Amino acid sequence: MLQLHDIEAAAARLKGHVLDTPFVESRTISQLTGCQVFLKFENLQYTASFKERGACNKLAQLTAQERARGVVAMSAGNHAQGVAYHAQRLGIRAVIVMPLFTPGVKVERTRGFGAEVVLHGDTLDASRSHARELAQRDGLVFVHPYDDEAIVAGQGTLGLEMLREQPDLDTLVIAIGGGGLIAGIATAAKGIRPDIRIVGVQTERFPAMVNAIQGTQLPQGTSTIAEGIAVGTPGVITEAIVRRRVDELLLVDEGDIEQAIVMLLEIEKTLVEGAGAAGLAALIKHPARFAGQRVGLVLCGGNIDPMLLASIIERGMVRAGRLARIQVNARDVPGNLARIATTVAEAGANVNEVHHQRAFTLLAAQNVAIELVLQTRGREHIELVIERLREAGFDAASVPM
């Protein structure tokens, strides 16, 4: 099984080729979660992901003959970019097989690093099978995204850096897909500090490692905003390490991840993808498990589709009460809409959208249901707006989400 000295050797290979990213405390997030939170900004890597570490370590150990043949990898995006970038830097041909559901931003970035991109398969397993076929057919070296000791050792260099900066951490909370990241970090961290607690996080829609370790049969989903950890089958190497060195596994849902993405964007002014927010999502969902502890999180990736991000931000504003829907029932006469808008403005809210409903309503025929989408300061402000509308003589109420 992989040991600390393997991680230290990987760190020597990576020196000067990947960033030693910042690892700093977030005072505001610490106050909100009830524990002292330190963030490792792996989204600042050149390809915006920790995956560079494993890819660079693997490629650096190829023989001259293997380099001449080239490599093939399968990935939903971040591993693809890491392999493509370091293959380009080292002058190695790279073929990347990506699932059909991969966000366009990741596909284009991978092509931008000079890789030959093949879109194939509706699942990661289907893409992996095709990549292995290409490896056998064309003599390419298959670079697995997680089930490879060289990959795991590269990812483990994160653990060395985190404990060097903050040697007194109590707990590390790490996202799990196939397990490469947590297996590497757990190996490094437990090698330095056997008493440190390692907690893994998976999304409820893809609980493959939880099922494997705990013997459960939780259902597998088909999609998640954390597509970077949407893995159907954990690695053989990584599962063995997780069994031995990871202390606890937690599940988070889509809403927890969305909330974490918005928190990091608003508080830390940093952009992460769904997988990169999984650790913070665990702190949000399970605060009692981390209360009063010094906790290290890895913001493991920042490659998120802009349209998905826009939707997450808008939904986050709804959850926070800063974007609200209210319905006002009023007489359908000239001037009433203007009076409603004036009342809303005087209450300090801004009108985003207005919808009139005359046909699909049980109101009297001479009345109209007016639905307003408002920008507000929060839930108390929403109630204030409704109160002011009622004082003005209108029948107003919030519309449930």
Image (cartoon, rainbow, N blue to C red):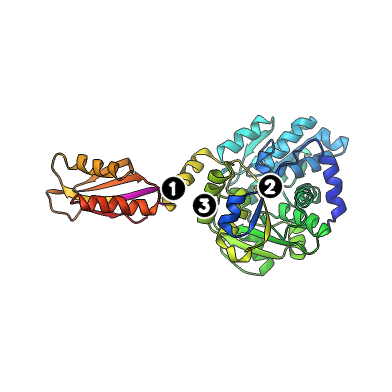
- Tell whether position 159 is magenta: no
Question: Which residue bears the numbered disc 3?
Answer: 259
Label 1 or label 2, whichever lies nearer to me, is 2
Label 3 or label 2, whichever lies nearer to me, is 2
| Residue 305 sits in quarter | top right
| Residue type, label 3 | Gln
Tell me the SS state at disc 2.
strand
Q: Position of residue 90 (x, y in %)?
A: 80, 32
Looking at the rendered image, the quarter that the N terminus falls into is bottom right
Q: Position of residue 45 (x, y in %)?
A: 69, 38
One can see residue 123 in this view:
no
**C-alpha separation, residue under disc 3 versus residue under disc 1:** 10 Å
| Residue 179 sits in quarter | bottom right
Tell me the SS state at disc 3.
helix
- Tell whether position 325 is magenta: yes
Local packing at callout 1 (Cα closer than 10 Å; few below 14, some 14-19, many 20+) is some
Q: Are marks 3 and 2 in contact (CB under 8 Å)?
A: no
- Closer-to-camera residue (77/10): 10
Of the two numbered discs 3 and 2 on the same chain, state the one appearing first in sequence.
Answer: 2
- Closer-to-camera residue (275/381): 381
One can see residue 239 in this view:
yes
Q: Are marks 1 and 2 in contact (CB under 8 Å)?
A: no
Local packing at callout 3 (Cα closer than 10 Å; few below 14, some 14-19, many 20+) is many
Name the mark on residue 317. 1
Seen in the image, is 356 located left or right of residue 83?
Answer: left
Question: Which residue bears the numbered disc 2?
Answer: 24
**C-alpha separation, residue under disc 3 versus residue under disc 2:** 21 Å
Name the mark on residue 240. none
Q: Position of residue 247 (x, y in %)?
A: 71, 65
